[in-house]
Amino acid sequence: PGVAFHRYLNGCVFWQEADGDDRLGLQGDADGECDGDSKADTPDVPPSTADLDNTPEYLNKALEGLPPRWKNYWIRGVLSLAMISGFFLIIYMGPVTLIFVVMTIQIKCFHEIITIGYRVYHSYELPWFRSLSWYFLICVNYFFYGETVADYFGALVQREEPLQFLARYHRFISFALYLAGFCMFVLSLVKKHYRLQFYMFAWTHVTLLIVVTQSHLVIQNLFEGMIWFIVPISIVICNDIMAYLFGFFFGRTPLIKLSPKKTWEGFIGGFFSTVVFGFFLAYLLSQFQYFVCPVGINSETNGFTVECEPSDIFVMQEYTLPTVVQNTLRQKTVNLYPFQIHSIFLSSFASLIGPFGGFFASGFKRAFKIKDFASTIPGHGGIMDRFDCQYLMATFTHVYIASFVRGPNPSKVLQQLLMLQPEQQLSIFHTLHSHLRDRGILPPALKITSVILR
């Protein structure tokens, strides 16, 4: 007892403790090949409500005479229209509502992935584990949202003494909270469940990395301006819909084995449709200050504000067309918002690389023999089934902004200056004043003012 020995499953070696830590439900034949797609490689998955039909009864009755293919088409279509309408309503309600919606979606996605882990590894009886999973979610959210508040709303933090303390020691508090969870996990280890508990510990952390980290980037994009939130999400939705429609009506050639229903016709049709849609959506939204201005804080009302002088990428500019295009259109120049050019790159990513987020999710579901992450949305599956590409798109948008769009942000610099001690602020003032005077930006008359201040 207590001595580890190994056994063979389909030609693969697995270690097992004699006191029993083999909870994965793996079965195999010692004479088989070591194949990544073999049954021995896939845990037995208990039945899930995600595989049940939860379509509203009235829809089932209205569509009961249709073939299954067309019935699914109409169910997906009706629910898609409902979700798009809800998306417009949320946008109308403003950035605060959008932040809470992103948080809600994040929590639901986390719940769906963690629940699969619970079912797959039969971990309901593991001590503390369900509580620890949600505790780590709270810790990571506290860290990310605290960083956002300190980064974008430093002036507001400085006016509230309790917030000053939390902002100053935010990272230490976040680490201490995580460390408490880490210690609780170590204390919860049970001898006969060591391997299973570490599986689930890793499962939780990978889920946090995929869901929470990328959700934070969605919020970061939102604070850069609602247009950086709306356009990426909209073009992914457009690509999803148009690829489905082109594939439904014209699809003949399979695209990838992970998703047998995906076709080259849908992939290509979705690409061109998305680029055109993104180009005109960018033109429409670039005209409104409400969408293009970074989300800030109003010092008088302590509320969110979206008022600013639009940056250059949201100001109409004249571009000279290539010679070939000039001969075709008989026009030498064209007026565009620079953001429309950015939208072409965003749309291209959403159409060409974004679907790989869906393929990744398909591979994940096939690995665990499930159809959908959950059954939240009839005809669509779970929330994670709708946001598998959105999270990848949000990460790309954040990297794209940081690499090609965002320059120094004066408001952030000012907020950091306001957090300094008076002596430090005065020192920076004198240094900046001397620098501007030496460059000839300040008129000579201000030299007298400088002497008086000294």
Image (tube, rainbow, N blue to C red):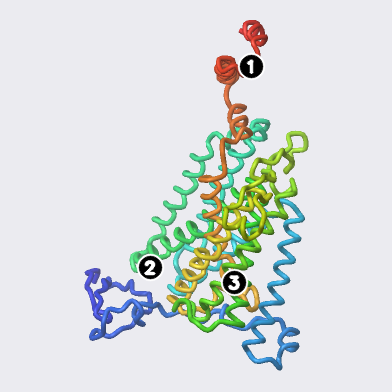
Nearest-to-viewer mark from 1 and 2: 1
Q: Residue at x 44, y 79 (%)?
A: 257
Q: Residue at x 43, y 52 (%)?
A: 182
Q: Quadrant of residue 85?
A: bottom right
The three-letter code of the residue at mark 3 reads Gly
* Rendered location of residue 282, percent (x, y): 67, 55
* Rendered location of residue 366, percent (x, y): 45, 77
Q: Which residue is mark 3?
A: 382
Q: Which mark is residue 196?
A: 2
Q: Is residue 332 left or right of residue 171?
A: right
Q: Which mark is residue 442?
A: 1
Q: Earlier in the sequence, mark 3 or mark 2?
A: 2
Q: State how far apart marks 3 and 2 are (Cα).
A: 26 Å
The kind of secondary structure element at disc 2 is helix
Q: Is residue 353 left or right of residue 221?
A: left
The three-letter code of the residue at mark 1 reads Leu
Residues 203 and 232: in front is 232
Residue 261 appears in the picture as rendered:
yes
* Rendered location of residue 45, percent (x, y): 46, 79
Nearest-to-viewer mark from 3 and 1: 1
Q: State how far apart marks 1 and 2 are (Cα).
A: 68 Å
Nearest-to-viewer mark from 3 and 2: 3
